[in-house]
Image (cartoon, rainbow, N blue to C red):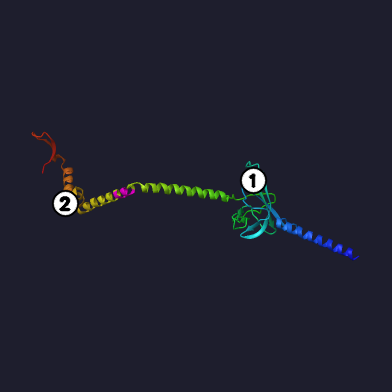
Amino acid sequence: MKKKSNEVSVGVFVIVGFVFLTLVLFFVSGVYLFRSGYSVEVMFNYVSILNKGAPVRMAGVRIGEVSQVDIVYDEAKQNNRVKVKLFIEKGVQIRENYKFTIRGTHVLSEPHVEITPVAGNFPQIQKGVVREGVPLVAVEELIDRAHGILSDLSSVTGKFKTSLDREGTLDESLKNIRASTESLNNVLGKIEKGEGTLGKLLMEDGLYQEMDAFAKDVRAHPWKLVRKTTEDSRKWYFLYLA
Protein backbone atom coordinates (compact mmCIF):
# COMPACT_ATOMS: atom_id res chain seq x y z
CA MET A 1 0.00 0.00 0.00
CA LYS A 2 2.86 2.32 0.91
CA LYS A 3 4.61 1.47 -2.35
CA LYS A 4 1.51 2.37 -4.33
CA SER A 5 1.22 5.73 -2.52
CA ASN A 6 4.82 6.59 -3.43
CA GLU A 7 4.15 5.82 -7.08
CA VAL A 8 1.13 8.14 -7.08
CA SER A 9 3.21 10.96 -5.51
CA VAL A 10 5.93 10.54 -8.10
CA GLY A 11 3.35 10.58 -10.90
CA VAL A 12 1.73 13.77 -9.57
CA PHE A 13 5.17 15.41 -9.24
CA VAL A 14 6.05 14.50 -12.82
CA ILE A 15 2.75 15.86 -14.14
CA VAL A 16 3.10 19.15 -12.21
CA GLY A 17 6.68 19.50 -13.43
CA PHE A 18 5.63 18.85 -17.01
CA VAL A 19 2.86 21.49 -16.81
CA PHE A 20 5.25 24.01 -15.26
CA LEU A 21 7.89 23.32 -17.92
CA THR A 22 5.26 23.73 -20.67
CA LEU A 23 4.18 27.10 -19.27
CA VAL A 24 7.81 28.22 -19.11
CA LEU A 25 8.36 27.20 -22.73
CA PHE A 26 5.24 29.09 -23.81
CA PHE A 27 6.42 32.18 -21.93
CA VAL A 28 9.91 32.08 -23.43
CA SER A 29 8.64 31.47 -26.95
CA GLY A 30 6.16 34.34 -26.73
CA VAL A 31 3.03 32.16 -26.94
CA TYR A 32 0.37 33.09 -24.39
CA LEU A 33 -2.62 30.90 -23.70
CA PHE A 34 -4.15 32.84 -20.85
CA ARG A 35 -3.66 36.47 -21.91
CA SER A 36 -6.29 38.44 -23.76
CA GLY A 37 -5.29 40.67 -26.63
CA TYR A 38 -5.18 40.89 -30.41
CA SER A 39 -2.71 40.46 -33.25
CA VAL A 40 -1.26 42.95 -35.73
CA GLU A 41 0.72 41.92 -38.81
CA VAL A 42 3.50 44.15 -40.18
CA MET A 43 5.57 43.75 -43.33
CA PHE A 44 9.31 44.53 -43.43
CA ASN A 45 12.02 44.16 -46.05
CA TYR A 46 14.64 43.44 -43.39
CA VAL A 47 14.38 42.69 -39.65
CA SER A 48 18.05 42.16 -38.67
CA ILE A 49 18.25 40.02 -35.48
CA LEU A 50 14.59 40.42 -34.48
CA ASN A 51 13.23 37.05 -33.37
CA LYS A 52 10.07 35.53 -31.98
CA GLY A 53 9.43 36.65 -28.39
CA ALA A 54 11.01 40.08 -28.81
CA PRO A 55 9.20 42.91 -26.99
CA VAL A 56 6.74 45.30 -28.62
CA ARG A 57 6.94 48.77 -27.08
CA MET A 58 5.06 52.03 -27.33
CA ALA A 59 6.72 55.14 -25.88
CA GLY A 60 9.17 52.74 -24.21
CA VAL A 61 6.44 50.74 -22.43
CA ARG A 62 6.13 47.05 -23.22
CA ILE A 63 2.67 46.39 -24.66
CA GLY A 64 3.18 42.99 -26.27
CA GLU A 65 5.53 40.57 -27.95
CA VAL A 66 6.54 39.33 -31.37
CA SER A 67 4.56 36.12 -31.78
CA GLN A 68 5.74 35.07 -35.24
CA VAL A 69 8.38 35.94 -37.86
CA ASP A 70 8.01 34.42 -41.34
CA ILE A 71 9.48 34.86 -44.81
CA VAL A 72 6.66 35.36 -47.33
CA TYR A 73 6.47 36.24 -51.00
CA ASP A 74 4.88 39.63 -51.65
CA GLU A 75 2.86 39.37 -54.85
CA ALA A 76 2.43 43.16 -55.08
CA LYS A 77 6.17 43.90 -54.92
CA GLN A 78 7.30 40.64 -56.52
CA ASN A 79 9.86 40.00 -53.81
CA ASN A 80 10.47 37.98 -50.65
CA ARG A 81 9.65 39.94 -47.51
CA VAL A 82 9.30 39.38 -43.78
CA LYS A 83 5.91 39.24 -42.09
CA VAL A 84 6.06 39.98 -38.36
CA LYS A 85 3.04 39.08 -36.26
CA LEU A 86 2.66 41.13 -33.08
CA PHE A 87 0.64 40.23 -30.01
CA ILE A 88 -0.81 43.41 -28.46
CA GLU A 89 -2.28 43.41 -24.98
CA LYS A 90 -5.98 44.09 -24.52
CA GLY A 91 -6.79 47.75 -23.91
CA VAL A 92 -3.92 49.14 -26.01
CA GLN A 93 -5.23 50.93 -29.07
CA ILE A 94 -3.15 50.88 -32.26
CA ARG A 95 -4.44 53.27 -34.92
CA GLU A 96 -3.94 53.09 -38.66
CA ASN A 97 -1.50 56.00 -38.88
CA TYR A 98 0.92 54.68 -36.22
CA LYS A 99 4.44 53.79 -37.33
CA PHE A 100 6.12 50.40 -36.76
CA THR A 101 9.91 50.51 -36.47
CA ILE A 102 12.48 47.89 -35.54
CA ARG A 103 14.88 49.23 -32.91
CA GLY A 104 17.80 47.97 -30.84
CA THR A 105 19.50 45.92 -33.54
CA HIS A 106 23.02 46.83 -32.33
CA VAL A 107 25.03 44.81 -29.82
CA LEU A 108 24.34 46.86 -26.68
CA SER A 109 20.56 46.99 -27.02
CA GLU A 110 17.57 44.66 -27.08
CA PRO A 111 15.91 44.12 -30.46
CA HIS A 112 12.26 45.14 -30.33
CA VAL A 113 9.43 46.63 -32.35
CA GLU A 114 8.67 50.26 -31.48
CA ILE A 115 5.19 51.59 -32.24
CA THR A 116 5.19 55.37 -32.60
CA PRO A 117 1.85 57.16 -32.17
CA VAL A 118 1.08 59.89 -34.72
CA ALA A 119 -1.42 62.68 -34.08
CA GLY A 120 -4.64 62.49 -36.03
CA ASN A 121 -8.16 61.16 -35.76
CA PHE A 122 -7.67 57.76 -37.42
CA PRO A 123 -9.61 54.56 -36.71
CA GLN A 124 -8.19 51.65 -34.81
CA ILE A 125 -6.44 48.90 -36.79
CA GLN A 126 -8.89 46.24 -37.89
CA LYS A 127 -8.21 42.53 -37.62
CA GLY A 128 -6.62 41.04 -40.73
CA VAL A 129 -5.15 44.32 -42.00
CA VAL A 130 -1.41 44.10 -42.75
CA ARG A 131 0.58 47.25 -41.96
CA GLU A 132 3.78 48.47 -43.67
CA GLY A 133 6.78 48.89 -41.37
CA VAL A 134 9.41 51.61 -41.54
CA PRO A 135 12.36 50.32 -43.67
CA LEU A 136 15.35 49.25 -41.62
CA VAL A 137 18.88 49.87 -42.90
CA ALA A 138 21.33 47.08 -42.18
CA VAL A 139 24.29 47.93 -39.94
CA GLU A 140 26.63 46.44 -42.52
CA GLU A 141 25.26 48.82 -45.17
CA LEU A 142 25.85 51.80 -42.87
CA ILE A 143 29.43 50.63 -42.32
CA ASP A 144 29.96 50.33 -46.10
CA ARG A 145 28.62 53.87 -46.58
CA ALA A 146 30.95 55.16 -43.87
CA HIS A 147 33.91 53.46 -45.57
CA GLY A 148 32.92 55.06 -48.88
CA ILE A 149 32.74 58.51 -47.30
CA LEU A 150 36.13 58.04 -45.63
CA SER A 151 37.61 56.90 -48.94
CA ASP A 152 36.28 60.01 -50.71
CA LEU A 153 37.63 62.28 -47.96
CA SER A 154 41.01 60.57 -48.17
CA SER A 155 41.09 61.10 -51.94
CA VAL A 156 40.21 64.80 -51.63
CA THR A 157 42.81 65.27 -48.89
CA GLY A 158 45.45 63.57 -51.03
CA LYS A 159 44.72 65.81 -54.03
CA PHE A 160 44.89 68.91 -51.84
CA LYS A 161 48.17 67.79 -50.32
CA THR A 162 49.58 67.12 -53.80
CA SER A 163 48.67 70.63 -54.92
CA LEU A 164 50.39 72.04 -51.82
CA ASP A 165 53.52 69.98 -52.47
CA ARG A 166 54.07 71.49 -55.92
CA GLU A 167 57.01 73.89 -56.01
CA GLY A 168 55.81 77.33 -55.07
CA THR A 169 52.38 76.90 -56.70
CA LEU A 170 50.38 78.04 -53.70
CA ASP A 171 52.97 80.56 -52.49
CA GLU A 172 53.25 82.08 -55.94
CA SER A 173 49.46 82.44 -56.25
CA LEU A 174 49.27 84.10 -52.84
CA LYS A 175 52.08 86.47 -53.75
CA ASN A 176 50.33 87.44 -57.00
CA ILE A 177 47.08 88.08 -55.16
CA ARG A 178 48.90 90.16 -52.53
CA ALA A 179 50.75 92.20 -55.20
CA SER A 180 47.54 92.87 -57.13
CA THR A 181 45.81 94.00 -53.95
CA GLU A 182 48.63 96.38 -53.05
CA SER A 183 48.67 97.83 -56.60
CA LEU A 184 44.91 98.41 -56.49
CA ASN A 185 45.22 100.09 -53.10
CA ASN A 186 47.93 102.41 -54.46
CA VAL A 187 45.79 103.42 -57.45
CA LEU A 188 42.77 104.10 -55.25
CA GLY A 189 44.94 106.10 -52.85
CA LYS A 190 46.23 108.32 -55.66
CA ILE A 191 42.71 108.90 -56.95
CA GLU A 192 41.55 109.93 -53.47
CA LYS A 193 44.49 112.39 -53.27
CA GLY A 194 43.66 113.88 -56.68
CA GLU A 195 46.84 112.61 -58.32
CA GLY A 196 46.94 111.57 -61.95
CA THR A 197 44.48 112.36 -64.74
CA LEU A 198 41.61 110.33 -63.29
CA GLY A 199 42.22 111.70 -59.83
CA LYS A 200 42.15 115.31 -61.05
CA LEU A 201 38.99 114.72 -63.04
CA LEU A 202 37.27 113.22 -60.02
CA MET A 203 38.65 115.38 -57.23
CA GLU A 204 39.28 118.92 -58.66
CA ASP A 205 36.11 121.00 -58.65
CA GLY A 206 37.64 123.78 -60.82
CA LEU A 207 38.29 121.47 -63.75
CA TYR A 208 34.84 120.03 -63.46
CA GLN A 209 33.28 123.51 -63.43
CA GLU A 210 35.26 124.55 -66.52
CA MET A 211 34.18 121.46 -68.44
CA ASP A 212 30.59 121.96 -67.34
CA ALA A 213 30.62 125.61 -68.46
CA PHE A 214 32.14 124.62 -71.81
CA ALA A 215 29.46 122.01 -72.41
CA LYS A 216 26.67 124.45 -71.54
CA ASP A 217 28.08 127.13 -73.85
CA VAL A 218 28.39 124.68 -76.76
CA ARG A 219 24.78 123.59 -76.31
CA ALA A 220 23.66 127.22 -76.26
CA HIS A 221 25.86 128.38 -79.23
CA PRO A 222 26.65 125.34 -81.41
CA TRP A 223 27.72 127.67 -84.28
CA LYS A 224 30.88 128.50 -82.36
CA LEU A 225 32.27 125.09 -83.33
CA VAL A 226 33.80 125.35 -86.78
CA ARG A 227 36.02 123.08 -88.75
CA LYS A 228 39.25 124.65 -89.94
CA THR A 229 42.12 123.23 -92.02
CA THR A 230 45.65 124.54 -91.79
CA GLU A 231 47.71 124.67 -94.92
CA ASP A 232 50.86 123.23 -93.29
CA SER A 233 49.56 120.19 -91.49
CA ARG A 234 46.34 119.60 -93.47
CA LYS A 235 44.78 118.28 -90.28
CA TRP A 236 41.23 118.67 -89.03
CA TYR A 237 40.57 120.17 -85.63
CA PHE A 238 37.90 122.01 -83.67
CA LEU A 239 38.36 125.63 -82.65
CA TYR A 240 36.39 127.23 -79.89
CA LEU A 241 35.60 130.88 -80.77
CA ALA A 242 35.38 132.98 -77.70
Q: Quadrant of the C terminus?
A: top left
Q: From this viewpoint, is residue 34 visible?
A: no
Taking the image as shown, residue 196 lies to the left or right of residue 119, namely left
**Viewer-side residue, 37 vs 119:** 37
Image location of residue 22, percent across then percent down? 76, 57
Secondary structure of the residue carrying numbered label 1: strand
Name the amino acid type tagged 1: Arg
Q: Quadrant of the N terminus?
A: bottom right
Give me the residue at 74% from left, 59% from top. Answer: 24
**Viewer-side residue, 10 vs 85:** 10
Which residues make up the magenta segment?
170-175
Give me the residue at 77% from left, 60% from top. Answer: 20
Graded by Cα atoms within 10 Å as few (under 14), some (14 to 19) or many (20 or more), the crowding at tag 2 reads few
Q: Is residue 190 magenta?
A: no
Please name the residue that numbered disc 1 is placed on. Answer: 81
Q: Is residue 173 magenta?
A: yes
**Viewer-side residue, 85 vs 153:** 153
Give me the residue at 79% from left, 61% from top. Answer: 17
Please name the residue that numbered disc 2 is placed on. Answer: 206
Image location of residue 202, percent across then percent down? 21, 50
Total residue callouts: 2
Q: CA distance from mark 2 to mark 1?
A: 89 Å
